[in-house]
Image: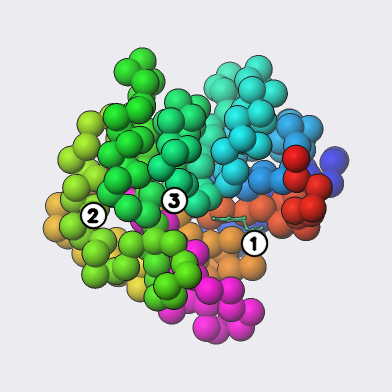
């Protein structure tokens, strides 16, 4: 077994255990493998181990990788690409054209551009609204107060399907303190659903806190380091 295959196995076990511990149905949490800074070879190793959904942060790096793995299939299906990084308005077009999901929509203008630029022959782009849950001015995301109005406006756009919320809490090593921000995101999600938005995705949890995120209802965890190893930003092309 390759290192990546073995790491994927470990991560899938962590997810299963956390799902069972939370009393949630098996299979209710999807794994997004975050392949940023790693090459197409690493993606292919993960694909060979059965992984289909990949997350990327940098547009040009991602486009190269998507092209280099266009022939890859898992159960006969092409790979599914999720954009999860900060998105500037001058970069929305290639994202609308080449990705299946965007988790990092942090203002209405970005969603409007993605909707206008989504090619007519592709299915709607799947969207998560990013919430700034730690309340720092330096962090991207809509503040919790603004979420209901922005979510409603995005849900009304053509060519997009609003699936849910995404959050990246401040890193916290103490497991007993990791759950609180995830809980706040989940409560916001529950409120939106109670208000009639048909949402099914809570994108939260990374290598260091996936158990806490799953305990609070994450339906998709975004895992990089625990699958591919430590990232070397210096070598990024
Ligand atoms: C890099 C990244 C991840 C993966 O983080 P790890 O700690 O390596 O698992 C998840 N989500 C986002 C938005 C990221 O940028």
* Magenta stretch holds residue 28: no
Q: Residue at the left extreme?
A: 195
Quarter of the image for residue 145 reads bottom left
Residue 25 in the figure: left or right of residue 79: left
Q: Is residue 5 visible?
A: yes
The magenta region covers 161-182
Quarter of the image for residue 174 reads bottom right
Q: Which mark is residue 55?
A: none
Q: Choose between 195 and 215: the one closer to the eye.
A: 195
To which residue does mark 3 refer?
A: 104
Q: Is residue 7 above or below residue 217?
A: above
**SS for dot 1:** loop
How far apart are the two marked residues, 1 and 2, measured between alpha carbons? Answer: 29 Å
**SS for dot 3:** strand
* Number of numbered discs on residues: 3
Residue 152 in the figure: left or right of residue 54: left
Determine the residue positioned at 43% across, 30% down.
93
Q: Is residue 125 above or below residue 33?
A: above
To which residue does mark 2 refer?
A: 150
Estimate the x, y position of residue 86 in percent, counting from the top left: 50, 51
Q: Is residue 183 visible?
A: no
Q: Choose between 216 and 42: the one closer to the eye.
A: 42
How far apart are the two marked residues, 1 and 3, measured between alpha carbons? Answer: 18 Å
| Among numbered discs 1 and 2, the one appearing first in the sequence | 2
**SS for dot 2:** helix
Mark 1, mark 2: which one is toward the viewer? 2
To which residue does mark 1 refer?
A: 207
Mark 1, mark 3: which one is toward the viewer? 3
């Amino acid at each position: 077994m390759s290192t990546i295959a073995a790491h994927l196995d470990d991560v899938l076990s962590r997810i299963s255990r956390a799902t069972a511990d939370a009393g949630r149905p098996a299979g209710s949490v999807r794994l997004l493998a975050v392949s940023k800074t790693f090459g197409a070879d690493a993606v292919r190793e993960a694909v060979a181990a059965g992984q289909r959904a990949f997350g990327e942060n940098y547009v040009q790096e991602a486009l190269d990788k998507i092209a280099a793995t266009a022939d890859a299939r898992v159960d006969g299906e092409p790979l599914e690409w999720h954009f999860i990084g900060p998105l500037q308005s001058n970069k929305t077009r290639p994202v609308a054209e080449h990705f299946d999901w965007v988790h990092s929509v942090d203002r209405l203008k970005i969603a409007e551009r993605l909707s206008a630029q989504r090619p007519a022959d592709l299915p709607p782009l799947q969207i998560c609204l990013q919430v700034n849950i730690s309340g720092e001015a330096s962090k991207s995301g809509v503040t919790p107060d603004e979420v209901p109005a922005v979510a409603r406006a995005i849900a009304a756009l053509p060519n997009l399907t609003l699936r849910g919320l995404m959050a990246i809490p401040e890193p916290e090593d103490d497991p007993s303190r990791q759950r609180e921000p995830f809980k706040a995101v989940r409560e916001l999600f529950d409120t939106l659903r109670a208000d009639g938005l048909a949402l099914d995705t809570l994108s939260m949890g990374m290598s260091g806190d996936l158990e806490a995120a799953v305990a609070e209802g994450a339906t998709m965890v975004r895992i990089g380091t625990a699958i591919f190893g430590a990232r070397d930003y210096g070598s990024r092309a």
